[in-house]
Image (cartoon, rainbow, N blue to C red):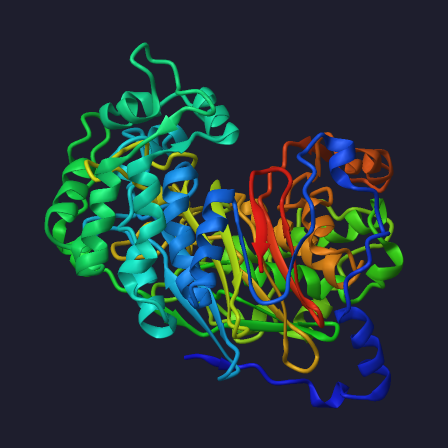
Amino acid sequence: MPLKVPAFRARRILVLGLWLAAVTAAPAQTMAPAPEAATGRTAKTLGTAQRYMAAAANPLAAAAGREILRAGGSAADAAIAIQLVLNLVEPQSSGIGGGAFLLHWDEAGRTLATLDGRETAPKAATPERFLGADGKPMKFVDAVVGGRSVGVPGTVRLLEEAHKRWGKLPWAELFAPAIKLAEEGFAISPRLAGLLALEKNLSRDARASLYFYEADGKPRAAGTTLRNPAFAATLRAIAQRGAGAFYEGEIAQDIVATVTGHKNNPGDMTLDDLAAYKVEERAPLCGRYRAYTLCGMGPPSSGAIAVQQILGVLATRDMARLGPGAEAAHWVAEAGKLAFADRALYLGDPAFVSVPAAGLIDEDYIRERARLVSPDRAMGKASAGSPPNKRALLLAPSDGIENGTSHISVVDAAGNAVSMTTTIEDGFGSRLMTKGGFLLNNELTDFSFAPSEDGKPVANRVEPGKRPRSSMAPTIVFDAFGRLYAVTGSPGGSQIIGYVAKTLVALLDWKLDPQRAVDLANFGSRNGPTELEKGSEAEGWKAALEARGHEVRLLEMTSGIQAIVKTPEGYLGGADGRREGVAIGD
């Protein structure tokens, strides 16, 4: 059910009002040097707009969203158009062959709703799906490539449901930008070209090879015009007949044939699986951070719970005083260890496992967990806690593997907002392309490969009809008076949680504008080593963290955060300089 977002009336005092007025003005830009200067990432200009704004991972997709907003479309309309274009220009990350989570803020009704368009396991799936003949978990790449990894896609049903609830423009009109690009062509971006050059398995699929590669087998170069008439035909069918055109009939038959027809690694999806797919409305998961309310997606996503747990631990510290640096990284990493320990044990599809969601973000529970953090010494690997409302259970922890995604942030002229994280899981998904011109996901590899540990079942094991655990963390932030303040989220697999937490601290504690907040060096921990972004200012914190006992790893941490912040003058937007996105509006 949609959630009314209340103001914290007890906090409505003059001092807070004066403080909040300063916060909601244009955020400060003086806390840290521009990260792109240190890392070589693309320097991007802070986006500004007075009426509405769209932020997405590719300029063509963001432009499609702005086009819809200019035509009087809603935030939901713009998000739909953006997603369809992303299927073309960023096919490695998301598309109609995958799934998504969507948050929607209704400004007039003051309500927040969340829709779960996560993929589901086929009815024939068993817990042993990703075990080899020896009874041991398969290698990730062996599980991914082929039909075995493909979940029943949810994105098209999600887009249709969002339009039914919050759309303003005709459904078919939202398909026009993507159809035009598919037919007339678009230039392959440097990022897509670079990923094609690194990819080892996509060219083995005949349809994908014809589309993405030259006759000599080399990947098409950046700037090459790519046309996809098959996808244009798919979009026309959905535009004319609705989501039913995807889940039944020729498109559905082709999906099933593609999944089950793989020579080496076939899947078991059926037409009944596709026809039975339903979007689930979930209760928004909201918690406080200082004077703000943070809202996100509940299970089967672990994103909102983990982000709120991390920030709950940080709420016990004066993060504004610390600013970016080794000490802040210590606290963020230790909080991340605690959050990921709980995530590994408790999180899964709530239709299959009892998830103590409210207990995991209970303020007293988080304060108790925060006492485990030493200001001077790293804790090593954390253990899961015992949150309130936990039912008796005998489960084993399981970390799991997650990879790529994309994120969309939109605010329309009426003040409605969408935060949507969308995915086909690994880069280029299952490496299977349909006759309809789109790639299929490998989302089932987000399940735990081992169904049990030490004789105990894991919460995120494969089961028929089940939705795999996710780390996607689309987030909407409200100020102390219940007003929309920020819309954000990121791709990045299980690192999404740390990316979003960092961005929120940068926005809310360090008062960085959204461009500097998303570009700030990434850092954190997933209950293992403390991870610092290679080539960023965070490298300079390594020695200080090691002195506190942290095992530090320098990694490529390629987030792709989009963030929009509401100010008295309009909107400020940031798109992560590590990728090709932009935040634009009027």
Residue 7 appears in the picture as rendered: yes
> Looking at the image, is 450 positioned above or below residue 323?
above
Residue 402 appears in the picture as rendered: no
Residue in view at x 34 percent, y 60 percent: 159
In the rendered structure, the answer to whether residue 186 lies left or right of residue 303 reads left
Residue in view at x 32 percent, y 36 percent: 184
Looking at the picture, how far across and down is residue 377, in whole percent?
83, 47
Looking at the picture, how far across and down is residue 400, in whole percent?
47, 44
Query: In what quadrant of the picture does the C terminus appear?
Result: bottom right
Along the line of sight, the residue nearer the viewer: 104 or 99: 104
Residue in view at x 36 percent, y 70 percent: 167
Q: Which quadrant would residue 530 be assigned to in this image?
A: top right
Q: Which quadrant would residue 335 be assigned to in this image?
A: bottom right
Looking at the picture, how far across and down is residue 307, in whole percent?
62, 59
> Looking at the image, is 144 positioned above or below residue 364?
above
Along the line of sight, the residue nearer the viewer: 420 or 515: 515
Q: Which quadrant would residue 485 be assigned to in this image?
A: bottom right
Residue in view at x 26 percent, y 34 percent: 433
> Looking at the image, is 290 positioned above or below residue 41?
below
Along the line of sight, the residue nearer the viewer: 217 or 475: 217
